[in-house]
Amino acid sequence: MEALDLLLNRVSVGRLLEPAPDAAQRDLLFRAALRAPDHGQLRPWRFLTVEGAARQQLGELFAAALTASNPEAKPEALDKARAMPLRAPLLVVVIARITGHPKVPEQEQLLAAGCAAQGILLAAHAQGFGAMWRTGEFSYDAQVMAGLGLQAGERIVGFVYLGSVEGERRVPLALDPDDYVAAWQG
């Protein structure tokens, strides 16, 4: 796939099926992630893969976090939380590892981890897979972070869902750069 075609046509895909990327394809996903801009070469990221039965365990962690934050949560909401990780055969939890640094502020480290997530999305698209970067309340939940083994200074940037595209990949909406770009006049 040509680089500009990849950049201009990548779309989020929410309906993902087996198969997930295999070991060699995953290696390329993570190699692409590791090329993210990285001021200070801090490598402020790490990744967890979640697949198979671990997806159900993650769903239980989501349900437990929902119950802790909302003891009155309805059974339907708990079922929805449990089902979230089942929307794709493979999830990658993208984690920002924030460290104190005199020249690289926290925001730059978070952005670098976000760029690493984008690298995974682009590499998935280049290999013919679908992907969706999801966040939501569980990305910021202390119980979920603890359950995933995050340490002090770490944050979930997002859950990247990966798998094969169900049906036709949608065509991205054509956007006009002129609607988003202006010249600064000083």
Image (cartoon, rainbow, N blue to C red):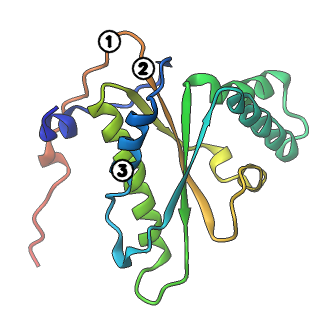
- Which quadrant is the C terminus positioned in? bottom left
Against 154, residue 62 (above or below) is above
The amino acid pointed to by label 3 is Arg
User: Could you tell me which secondary element the residue under label 2 belongs to?
Assistant: strand
| Disc 2 residue crowd, few under 14, some 14–19, many 20+, Cα 10 Å | many
Q: Position of residue 47 (x, y in %)?
A: 54, 51
Q: Earlier in the sequence, mark 1 or mark 3?
A: 3
The residue carrying mark 1 is 168
The amino acid pointed to by label 1 is Glu
Against 43, residue 10 (above or below) is above
Closer mark to the observer between disc 2 and disc 1: 2
Q: Earlier in the sequence, mark 3 or mark 2?
A: 3
The residue carrying mark 3 is 31
User: Could you tell me which secondary element the residue under label 3 belongs to?
Assistant: helix
Residue 12: name its quadrant: top left
Q: Position of residue 129 (x, y in %)?
A: 37, 26
**Disc sitting over residue 164 in the figure:** 2
Q: CA distance from mark 3 to mark 2?
A: 20 Å
| Disc 1 residue crowd, few under 14, some 14–19, many 20+, Cα 10 Å | few
